[in-house]
Amino acid sequence: MAEVVFDEASRIYTPGATPAVDKLSLTVNDGELVVLVGPSGSGKSTALRMLAGLEPIDAGHLRIDGRDVVDVASKDRDIAMVFQSYALYPSKTVRDNMAFPLKMRGMDKAEQAKRVNEAAEILGLTEYLDRKPKALSGGQRQRVAMGRAIVREPRVFLMDEPLSNLDAKMRVQTRAQIAGLQNRLDVTTVYVTHDQVEAMTMGDRVAVLRDGKLQQYATPSELYDRPVNAFVAGFIGSPAMNLMDLQRSGDGVTLGGSTLPLTREVADAAGSADTVTVGLRPEDLSLTSEGDGIKAVVDVVEELGSESYLYAHMAEHPDTTLVVRGPGRTRVRYGETIAVRVDPDAVHAFDASSGERLAS
Amino acid sequence: MTTTVEKPTTTSASPRHAASEKSRSEARLGWYLAGPAFAVMLLVTAYPILQAFYESLFDYRLTDPANRSFTGLTNYGVILTDPVWWDAFGVTVLITVVTVAVELVLGFALALVMVQALKALRPVLRAAILIPYAVITVVSAFAWQFAFAPDSGFVNSWFSFLGLAPDTDWFGSPGSAIFVICLAEIWKTTPFISLLLLAGLAQVPDVLQEAAKVDGATWWQRMRRVTIPNMKAAIMVALLFRTLDAFRVFDSVYVMTAGANGTEVLSFLAYRQTIARLEIGLGSAVSVLLFISVVLICGLFVKGFKVDLSQARGE
């Protein structure tokens, strides 16, 4: 049970160089699951390791339940961490791995055994308690790592890409398990991933990082509906949002020969700029009957059964490409020309040079 | 019915057959590659051992070659009932236990220093730590002998504040002589152990240390519960190599005391019988007994540690 506050916390590896984490400020409420997401090198893991006490905090503050932990050693922060590689102790059995943090705290044997057995029960590990990690599958090892974290009943859970070593099916399964477990235990959790699907599905709130800087910290739906800049817009959503620099013309922008209207506010915010970065989610584009709509030539068809994604380029501007969501079992084939209709309410517009969202 | 029973057996048999074919060809390649080295090893180690064993069965002295006679295991009986052998055995065990124990602790400390030193300092530090190991044993033995020499050595004059008389004869009594021999051995071979332990330390993933930190372990607990258990294989290899080496200690003893004043060790006894007294038969028997001791130590270590050596290879 704890509130975690990053207060302009920075990690600077080499003085003068770009900080790995640059004045990160965010608050994780008690019991909340917050996901830090970003491409590699964005500083998300470093931020987590700062919270874990495995990286120093070079500037700013970091508070757990109001206490500044900048100078507090890991072992005194009352946190538990699940590592990407699980970091199980190879020479110890599953039981001893899970009991290790309790033992280090000098808890009495009976209580240790009780907690380990409970955690093993929850995670379905009871029959593996006497095995060494070597004799477990990847999914089981992951659960042991989770077990080692939950027996502690820590104030904060830290998870560093805990699913990335699992195969796709296990990942989806375990994702739901972790989210369920976190809900049940109601422990403040900071979760790091590079996978935006994980971020969107698991996080109460999601912090998007890039080059050590926080881009946006919001609920998944807000990130999706109102990305604050072109980077977040392109990062969140799969397939990614179509982002195009388009010429202004009158009240709108030119897309494939036709004009896409912009709202009053966006046009005002864009001011006198010649071009605007326009973002269109594939799911906000639809196929329409021949005649109206933007003409595009299909390059690739991805058929997913329930839906399909059509990768196409503009008939008149081959450099501009688009991804369009089509119906499942589409009859559209490679090389065909399609007509695309844009939902005018779903147009995202960003400043072409700064990438900031135009209008609210 | 018969077909349904037969079918799985044939399908499951064929991949197994393919696998064994592959492993067999790998084994063959292994022999082609290692074969020549194996043959050389046989020639230079197995042959002398067998020759020594053969010689040990004879009463044979080079000063009286005509009276060479087959006596079976009599030489072994003579040696094992003679206090000279048991004294040398005791001294050898003492030197082995003291040097290996001290070297293990010291070597581990040095390995930790090398791992944790600043990157810029590391090459210098490594070289400094390794220098003694690069010195020829005889040379280092002479250096230590000179240092402790009663008349001209610096130890007596420099360390007089320790209450040393300026004419302390270090090599005059068994205790102090063995102390100096151990010191020379430790100085010389600690780098070897620390190098092996350094390799072992490097194999313990950093993330385990981090996990233990978060789990609340102190530095000492991390060492004891995480680092050391995970480098058991490296520790065993270091201990084994050094024990076998220490058990055959010769150069230092030869240079410093020539076995006098109760410092005779087993390999010096073998040397004295074979080379000095030209008792080929008896000397060979001592060598064979020394060899058997070493094999037993080796067996004890491998059994006692119960280490899966594949761990040392990082599997």
Image (cartoon, coloured by chain):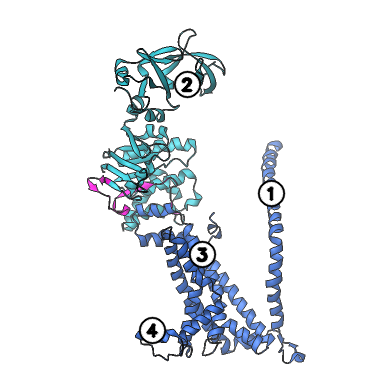
Name the colour assigned to chain A in the rendering.
Answer: cyan
Residue at the top extreme of this rendering: A291
Disc 3, SS:
helix
Residue B308, by quadrant, is bottom right
In this view, the mark in front (2 or 1): 2
Per the image, the residue denoted by label 4 is B159
Disc 4, SS:
loop
The region drawn magenta spans A60-89
Specify the quadrant that holds the N terminus of chain B.
top right
Mark 2 → mark 3, Cα distance in angstroms: 59 Å
Label 1 crowd bin: few (<14), some (14–19), many (20+), radius 10 Å = few
Per the image, the residue denoted by label 3 is B196
Per the image, the residue denoted by label 2 is A322
Mark 3 → mark 1, Cα distance in angstroms: 34 Å
Label located before the other in sequence (4 or 3)? 4
Label located before the other in sequence (4 or 1)? 1
User: Residue B22 has which mark?
Assistant: 1
For the residues beneath circles 2 and 3, the answer to whether they share a chain is no
